[in-house]
Amino acid sequence: MKLRGVLLDLDGTLVDHESAAAAALRTWLPSIGLAPTDDAVARWTTVQEPHLAAWRAGRISFAEQRRRRLRDFLGTGGADAELDEVFAGYLKHYEREWRAYDDVPGALATIAAAGLGAAVLTNGTRVQQRRKIEATGLGGRVGPIFTVDDLGVAKPDPDAFRRACARWGLAPGEVLSVGDNHALDVLGARAAGLRAVHLDRLGRGPAGEAHRMASLDELGGLLG
């Protein structure tokens, strides 16, 4: 099939979530009496994944995964309302740090010049991810935005990709998925019948992936 659209991940692909989170933590942690060490930043990343996975699987709410992350990170309990307030402090700093990667404007221009559509498929929530797109100057520059709230299922479930394509009006085989998470954005997409390329910005692999690029600047070579 002829390629008609590029389905882009958001965090780690268009927006530098990792840097935003790290910068936010270094500002926020002292406000709750914790040192903003490299170990603390790394631990925040480590403790979040099991709870995000539980949310993606539909076992807990998005708010509950945040509370569980905090309980693990702080090593303490706490009422839901108290934990929500603490997490809100982190969010204020995180949102101030949202930035699009430098290679994003050129990539979106390349997609448009090739006569292709662009859309976003993200495992975030509708409200936060749409705000993120607007805050980083991407509003109006990407097409449809598909979130877990919209689709009722999260990546890497192939149904997330199938439903996004169906709502977009494209067949899976007409769409190229681009994302930084190999398991979520590449393997899940291929299982749904999409083409896929791994955006491996930091060279983390996996080594056996043949369709890989280090920057969105390389996207043009894949759209011909």
Image (tube, rainbow, N blue to C red):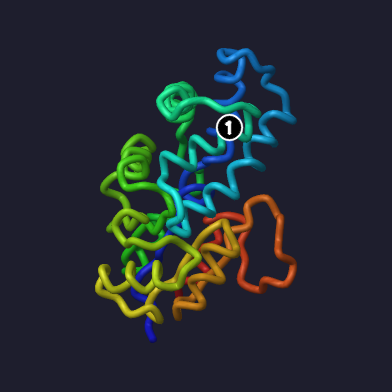
Inspect the image, locate mark 1, and give the three-letter code of the amino acid beneath it: Arg
How many numbered marks have been drawn onto this rendered protein structure? 1
Q: Note whether 27 is above or below 95 in the view shown.
A: above
Q: Quadrant of the C terminus?
A: bottom left
Residue 134 appears in the picture as rendered: yes
Depth check, front residue: 66 or 171: 66
Residue for badge 1: 71
- Residue at left offset 37%, top offset 83%: 2
Residue 105 appears in the picture as rendered: no
Depth check, front residue: 124 or 85: 85
Left or right: residue 196 versus residue 35 is: left
Name the spot of residue 220 as percent of width and height, x first. Answer: 48, 65
Dot 1: what SS? helix
- Residue at left offset 61%, top offset 26%: 76
Q: Quadrant of the N terminus?
A: bottom left
Name the spot of residue 222 as percent of width and height, x first. Answer: 51, 71
Q: Note whether 197 is above or below 63 in the view shown.
A: below
Q: Quadrant of residue 80?
A: top left
Q: Residue furthest bottom?
A: 1
Name the spot of residue 18 as percent of width and height, x first. Answer: 58, 40
Q: Note whether 179 is above or below 3 in the view shown.
A: above
- Residue at left offset 50%, top offset 65%: 156
Name the spot of residue 103 as percent of width and height, x first. Answer: 50, 48
Depth check, front residue: 109 or 187: 187
Left or right: residue 126 versus residue 14 is: left
Task: Judge the density around disc 1: few (<14), some (14-19), many (≥20) Cα neighbours within 10 Å.
Answer: some
